[in-house]
Amino acid sequence: MQSPAEYRLREHGLRPTRQRLALAELIFAQGHRHIAAESLYEEALAARVPVSLATVYNTLHQFTQAGLLRIIAVEGSRTWFDTNIDDHHHFYLEHESRVMDIPENSENPPIISNLPTPPAGMEIANVDLIVRLRRQKPHAGTKTKPD
């Protein structure tokens, strides 16, 4: 009997090699999340999965091309992979170097509701919105508590 990870890989046209299966189980076992290649590599080492960092990067990009993951590029040097491939937007917490989903609020209109018309022969494939957040700076006269 196939594992859920093996089924998912085959369903998306990927051959379920041992390394792909092990990484898929690590990635998808925790539900929706955002993961960087370096973090997945550390998880793999902790789980005793024999894999190189280059293999982790390659596998994440293969999963993205197959439609299993969505890439989130916040800065040129910082990339996350999202297990939630549905259309949604993100907060980037600068002080934590972390990405999180922007919760949907059914009472408010969609964040992006008036997109420009694409040029002839083109269509909008996806819209990525990343809202960068940082801690508020204290205002003059405001006492701050030490962390």
Image (tube, helix red, strand yellow):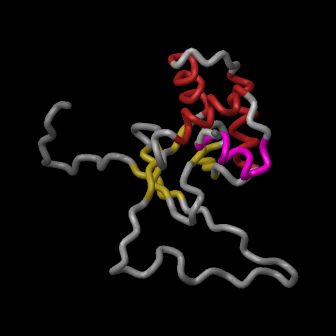
Image quadrant containing the C terminus: top left
Q: State the image quarter where residue 113 is shown.
A: bottom right
What secondary structure do most residues of the magenta stretch adopt?
helix
Residue at position x 49%, y 39% from top?
Answer: 29
Instruction: Tell me if 118 is positioned left or right of 40 in this view.
Output: right
Q: Is residue 98 magenta?
A: no
Residue at position x 54%, y 55% from top?
Answer: 84
Instruction: Tell me if 119 is positioned left or right of 136 in this view.
Output: right
Residue at position x 48%, y 58% from top?
Answer: 131
Q: Return the residue nearer the eye: 77 or 121.
A: 121
Expressed as whole percent of the image width and height from the top left, the position of residue 55 reads 73, 26
Give, as a single range, the part of the protein colored magenta.
4-14
Instruction: Tell me if 110 is positioned left or right of 82 in this view.
Output: left
91 is higher (above) or lower (below) than 25: below
12 is higher (above) or lower (below) than 109: above
Expressed as whole percent of the image width and height from the top left, the position of residue 71 reads 64, 49
26 is higher (above) or lower (below) than 110: above
Image quadrant containing the N terminus: top right
Residue at position x 57%, y 29% from top?
Answer: 40
Number of marks in the rendered image: 0
Which residue is most to the right?
A: 121
Q: Return the residue nearer the eye: 85 or 132.
A: 85
Expressed as whole percent of the image width and height from the top left, the position of residue 117 reads 72, 84
Expressed as whole percent of the image width and height from the top left, the position of residue 91 reads 45, 54
Q: Is residue 5 magenta?
A: yes
